[in-house]
Amino acid sequence: MATWESEDLDLDGLLTHIGYRGDLSPTPETLAALHRAYTTSIPFENLEIMLDRPVLLDVKSLQDKLIRHRRGGYCFEHATLFAAMLEALGFRFSAVLGRVTMGGDAARRPATHALLVVEFDDGRRVLCDVGFGRGPLEPIPVEDGVEVVQDGWRLRLTRTSSEGPTGIHDEWTMWQQQADPDGTPAWVDRHVWTLEPVHPIDFAVGNHYVSTSSRSPFTMRPFVQRFHADRQDTLDGRTWTTVAPDGRVLAQRDVEIGEIPRLLADVFDIELGAPDTAALLESLSRLPAMRVDAVAR
């Protein structure tokens, strides 16, 4: 059995779903195009948790949910499916875990963000972050101080080295540029991570925590994102926000519970069946009647 279950992957079905018809050789150009197609085609969402169902990470279940039923997922689902595709195409890569900070204290955040690092024959390494819901559109070179601008979305990586009992320890930080309330551009640390490889079982452990722990923000309220080259939409609880590539908030409002099924379909390209819609509305009715977008991710 392949490490990431690529033997169970319907590669043609996935490529059709994300609208990719290009070259499939394991090159930097192919990876960039696949990453862009994937991140702009499949939404980020945690609705299975709101529907009181387990989040499954086997490739057959992921294909059934994300492709056949045109749903989305969160980082462990996206990274696992993307890893199966990379494995099927012959890319050399490893999985790593990060801590989502968004300006907070990394030491107080669990390592529950799934990432992939691809290495090419010339030694170059790039970070693939297909499961954050806000890009990047394409992989980012794993180089200290590198800064990229992808269709206006500005990100950078930095490395911090420290000496510990086992030697030198390198920790990487991804930064994203967003706008302060007055519109001033500001850099915010998005997540920290190391190059220590992990395995599918490590994704399974993190997935269990994120989908079941009362301390996980994803068990507290629905969180849905759709990423486009020119904007990103987020439904955080009952708050719908649209941001521009430079981080400016273009629109934000609280929505009524009854609006949410149509919002999911029209903005996030997620259409639930009647039973799931009814169950989701019931779940949403139990949310506090307050803005929840300030809850930490």
Image (cartoon, rainbow, N blue to C red):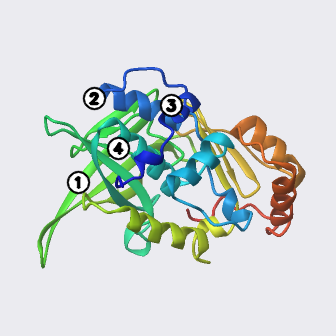
Tell me how far mark 4 sits from mark 2, CA to CA.
Answer: 13 Å
- The residue carrying mark 3 is 12
Question: Which of the two discs, 1 and 2, sits closer to the camera?
Answer: 2
Which numbered mark, 2 or 3, is in the foreground of this view? 3
Q: Which of marks 1 and 2 is nearer the N terminus?
A: 2
Q: Earlier in the sequence, mark 4 or mark 2?
A: 2
Left or right? Give the position of 72 relative to 99: right
Q: What element carries label 4?
A: helix
Q: Distance between the residues labelled 2 and 3?
A: 19 Å
- Gap between marks 1 and 4 measured at Cα: 27 Å
Q: Is residue 70 above or below residue 34?
A: below
For the residues labelled 1 and 4, say whether their Cβ atoms are less than 8 Å apart: no
**Residue in the image at 51% along x and 57% along y:** 58
Q: Three-letter amino acid code at disc 4?
A: Glu
Q: Do the residues labelled 4 and 2 touch (CB within 8 Å)?
A: no
Identified by mark 2, the residue type is Thr
Dot 3 or dot 1, earlier in sequence: 3
Alpha carbon separation for disc pair 3 and 1: 37 Å
Dot 1 corresponds to which residue?
Answer: 159
The first of marks 1 and 4 along the sequence is 4
* Residue 38 image position (x, y, % from top left): 50, 36
**Residue 35 appears left or right of 213:** left
Secondary structure found at label 2: loop
Question: What mark, if any, has residue 27 been given in the picture?
Answer: 2
